[in-house]
Amino acid sequence: MRSLLKKRPVWIIAGALFVTLLMIFGRSRDDPPPRPERAVLVDVIAVDRQTLRPTLDIFGSVQSPQDAELSAGIAGLVDAVAVRDGATVAEDELLVQIDPRDAELKLKQEEANQLEVEAQLRSAELRLKRDRLALEKETELVALIESRQTRAQELAEQNLLSQADLETADENLKRQQLALSQAELAVAEGNNRVTELRAQRARAIALRDQAALDVERSQVTAPFPGVVSELEVSEGDRVSVGDPLMRLQNPAAIEVRAQIPAAYAEMVDAGLGAGTAMNASVQAGEQRIPGRIVRLSGQTQQSSGGVDSFIGFNAPPRSLRLGTTVAVRVELPPVPDVTAVPAEAIYGRNQLYKVVDSRMQMVEFERVGERIGPDGRNEVLLRSPQLQDEEQVIITKLANAADGLLVKINEPEPSARTEQTARSGTDL
């Protein structure tokens, strides 16, 4: 009995080994049934190729084309400053008065110089008139004496006139020809003198006008209606020519300068050339101010990556302050034969997936632009020969997206369709 108890653990181990062998050799040799492929639930939209307008979100600065730095036109003491920084002024309103006395004295001097030159010119013109009349008389006398000399020569040849009388006739002719030459010289010198004095008169008039202009410049007035800023002078200051006085900007001519990326610059330029309206909206707080692209800059700044555009407004917006940076949304010219898909449908730079026989198929496309869709979401405008109307594009963002992946199209209730486009895929 005691020996049986000692052998009991051996029997237990042997029994366990026997059962294990039965389980190993007695199981079925058939392969296990394959697991069914699980489809991913996705949302889709139908391809609808049409003509659409891309939109572009950029930033710009508020400025005014009427933005002038006013400077002193003459040197002198500042007698009065009629405005303060931030003041709104009208066109031609007095801003700064500079002491005009020096300029007024200069004007009187130049006016006197002009009168003196004009008096000299009148005398020279009278003298020239007299010299021309004398020249006419001398010319007539030369013709008369030449006729007499010819007659004397004929008589001398016929021995009807003495040699002494012939010589006297020749002498008279030469004396008159010399007088004629002197008269011609006097007329020529008179012409030169009149020309010289006329030039002096023109110079005197220019100097007089310059002095009068300096008197006008003693009063600095507003060249256009605007707002004063950067006031740099006060009463009693001495200023020199060209010293800055203040800046004047016209809010009524306000516009926004925004840079169009180089990829879209040619499109915008072509649209402006064709007269296509390109609307824009400028964000000012909670308000969007409508405007339009009115022109492009004629020069591209080095390393800028784009071309500056100018956004104009039908009416000057009061909520925009000069010098501030604002967000701008620009509507580009219409592009034909493009498809709009939500941004979450895009993989990488230029890939998306469509559904073919319940499986994903990758499509490469040309990116035309972006826009804000009717529901306020960002959409990509694209073009691809691999996309045909009514084909279904997957708009659910999948972490395991790949060619050939089995998918099932989500069919939400009509009221919930707009809430399903950005969900992650769900395994069935």
Image: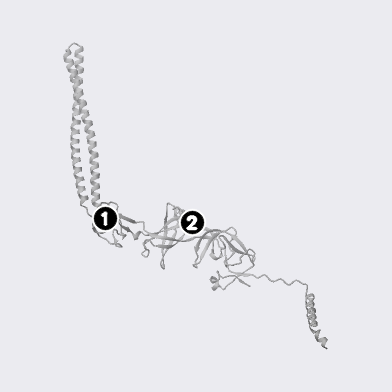
Q: Which quadrant is home to the C terminus?
A: bottom right
User: From what the image shows, is residue 12 above or below residue 414?
Assistant: below
- Mark 2 or mark 1, earlier in chain: 1
Q: Secondary structure at mark 2?
A: helix
Q: Amino acid at mark 1?
A: Val
Q: Which mark is residue 324?
A: none
Q: Return the residue nearer the eye: 302 or 162.
A: 302
Residue 417 can be seen in this image: yes
The mark tally for this picture is 2
Q: Is residue 329 left or right of residue 93?
A: right
Q: Is residue 116 left or right of residue 12?
A: left
Q: Amino acid at mark 2?
A: Tyr
In percent of width and height, residue 2 lies at: 82, 88
CA distance for labels 2 and 1 = 44 Å
Look at the numbered discs 2 and 1 and tell me whether their residues touch, using CB distance below 8 Å.
no
Q: Secondary structure at mark 1?
A: strand
Q: Which quadrant is home to the N terminus?
A: bottom right
Mark 1 Cα shell of 10 Å, populated few (<14), some (14-19), many (≥20): many
Residue beneath disc 1: 220
Residue 307 sits in which quadrant? bottom left
In percent of width and height, residue 33 lies at: 73, 72
In percent of width and height, residue 322 lies at: 36, 61
Q: Return the residue nearer the eye: 193 or 371.
A: 193
Q: Nearer the viewer, mark 2 or mark 1?
A: 1
Mark 2 Cα shell of 10 Å, populated few (<14), some (14-19), many (≥20): some
Q: Which mark is residue 264?
A: 2
In percent of width and height, residue 232 lies at: 29, 58
At 20% from the left and 40% from the top, the residue drawn is 117
Q: How is the image coloured?
A: one colour
At 78% from the left and 83% from the top, the residue drawn is 9
